[in-house]
Structures are given as structure tokens and as C-alpha cells.
Image (cartoon, helix red, strand yellow):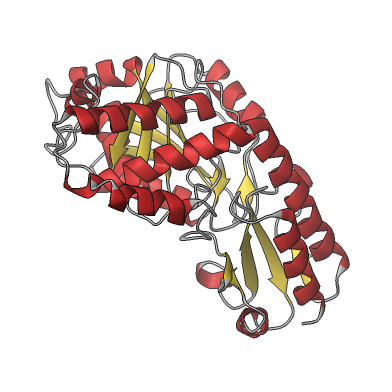
Amino acid sequence: MQTFFTPGPAQLYPTFEKHLQNFVSGQLGSISHRSQQYRDLHRFTVEQVRILLNVPETHAILFLGSASEIWERILFSCVELESFHLVNGSFSEKFYDYAHGLNKYAHKLEKPMGEGFTAAEVTVPEYAELICTTHNETSSGVQMNVAEIHKLKQKNPDKLIAVDIVSSAPYPDLDFKLIDTAFFSIQKAFGLPAGLGVWIVNEKCLKKAESIRQQYSIGAHNNLPTLWKNSLNNETPATPNVMAIYLLGKIAEDFNQIGVKTLRKETEQKAQLLYKFIEKHKGFSPFVKEKAHRSQTVIVANTELPSADVIKAVKEKGMVIGTGYGQFKSSQLRIANFPATSVEQVQELIKVLETV
């Protein structure tokens, strides 16, 4: 058995197998998505995610196929003409590209990979309707401080703000009184197989979508007004991924029993161990120079050896770590720091890396 420190798909959470067996033995894969049994299952998952991320009742929690699909839904729903994007890596760049693909006028403030943003340096274009931010840039290991995201909204109260928390939820403690929409997928920190995107979205976004559709398309499949209407009855417009929704509810319940504050503290403890090793050990160095911008959930290290050699050596010891992203594939490592891996497993990984 290997331990995966890959940034998604990632290590499965230890209770995954038990929950999967219960799903199968309960024959939940065969129930109607219009049955009371399904509605109860759906409601349970929404409640557990709401507790975990402290999401108020003003926001709906909706289920889609992936976070990439949610990019499109957000742009359809919240942008009539102009969007604004903070871009500092491949995934924030893709959000910007999706806006172009939908014929929106997309502005961006761009920084090189490995650098982060503060609210003070950001001037949002006057006519941009939506500010698109990435809390954790999976490609580069840069994290935007939650307080800076909040400040950005406070500086621009009349604009909607979207936050990509794909590779960091449930770590960031977002204030949903300020955040209009946020989204994540389950194959990273929730320790589940891929196939479900979770969209947290407020009534302001819903009203914007209803206004836009008077003149422009907001999409025919899974548009926000339809998703919202169905969610009021604990349902989805089309047949959903019942298994993934069930498993998310159970993992979120597990997280709630541990306590999100404890999870965050453990995440920081493990990140500290990894960064301390990377800073001090010959042959490795942190890619993100500014400590305040270093991700707590995806640690990126430069390597003197080709990264493939390091990955091979680690794999021989039963552990899998990620390559660098894109142009950095051969010169960097990406190490996921999600709840599915323990402090002891991180310490074991460091011991192995010391011998490479």
C-alpha cells in the first residue's frame, strides 16, 4: 500500500472504505434521486458542509460535476460583460481563460508563478462585475491570506467576489458575510475520488443570474436559478453523483467530529515540518520565497536533482509525491498536505527525502 502526497487526486481519507461499504450495503446507488431517502441524504451532506465551513443560510450549497464546471457557472451567472481575475498560476489563468471562452471582457492582474497578492496592490477595473480570486494556487503553492481576500471585498463592496478553495478547503476560514461565492472539489483535501464539485453561492449571485438571463445566455444545463430552485427541495436538476454526495457528507461529518480548528492546526503543524526540511536540507529550496504567501496545503519545493529521480526514490519506499506543474515539471516537487495524511506520515516522508 502506498501513501499519496499528490495534490489531487490525493490520499483517500482513512474512513473512506468504511463509508463506501455502507453505501453499497445500503443499496444507495439504486435509489431514486426524487425519493425522500435521497432528499434526506442530500440534506445531511449540505448540513455537514455548512457546519464545517461555517456557511450561513443566505448561501446555497450546490453539487456539480467538477470545480472546472463551476468556473463556467459562476461566469455565466455573475458576469454580464466584464470580469476581473487575479492570476499567478495555471489554475487562476484557466479561470480567466474560461471568461474569454464565454465572450466576456476579462481583465487580469498577473504576477509570476510563486508570487502572491495583497489587497492593497489590487485596483479593480471600474466596470468589472466579478472579482475572481484563488485562495490556493495548486500549480505554484501560493496561498492568498484570507484576511486579504476579505479586505479586497471590503474595498469593493458593490462587486461580487468568487474564491477558488479547490486545493485548500476546509483549511481557509472564510467569512461568508463577505464572500459571494466559493467552490471546491472533493479529490483533494476531502480525501475522496474525483467526480464532484461543490458550489457555495449567495442570493446576490442568484439575482444577478436572473437579471443577466433577460438578455444573455446563462447556460441551459445546471444554470444557477434551476440549481437553486431544486436545492430548496434537497434535490438536483439532473440525476446527481449520489455516491460522491453521500461520501462527502460522511467525510465532512468525520471532520466535524475532529473539529475544523483542530484540522487547521494539524495542517499548519505538518506544513511547518515540511517547510523546515525544505529550507534546511541541501538539494531542496522553497519555491515561494515570501513566507506569508506559502501554501499550507500544497508545498512546492525546487530540487537540484531531476524531480523524477526524487519521486522514484520516494516511491520505492511506498510514498508518492507530485511533480512540478507545467514548465516546472522536472525541477520541482508538489507535496500535498491534506487531512488524510498524519503528522507521523509526514515525518516518515521527510526521513525518506533526507536520504535522497
Answer with the quarter of the image where residue 85 lies: top left
Q: Count the marks: how many?
A: 0
Answer with the quarter of the image where residue 348 lies: bottom right
Question: In the image, 262: left or right of 2?
Answer: right
Q: Let me know if residue 290 appears in the view.
A: no
- Residue 140: x and y in percent read 59, 57
The residue at the point 30 percent across, 51 percent down is 25
Residue extending furthest front? 25
Q: Is residue 225 above or below residue 325?
A: above
Question: In the image, 320: left or right of 301?
Answer: left
- Residue 323: x and y in percent read 57, 71
- Residue 7: x and y in percent read 54, 59
Q: Nearer the viewer, residue 63 or 291?
A: 63
Residue extending furthest right? 280
The residue at the point 11 percent across, 37 percent down is 220
The residue at the point 67 percent across, 84 percent down is 313
Q: Quadrant of the N terminus?
A: bottom right
- Residue 16: x and y in percent read 46, 53
Q: Nearer the viewer, residue 40 or 233?
A: 40
Answer with the quarter of the image where residue 213 lies: top left
Q: Is residue 217 above or below residue 308?
A: above
The residue at the point 34 percent across, 41 percent down is 246
Q: Let me know if residue 221 appears in the view.
A: yes
Question: In the image, 338: left or right of 229?
Answer: right
Q: Is residue 161 above or below residue 346?
A: above
Q: Quadrant of the C terminus?
A: bottom right
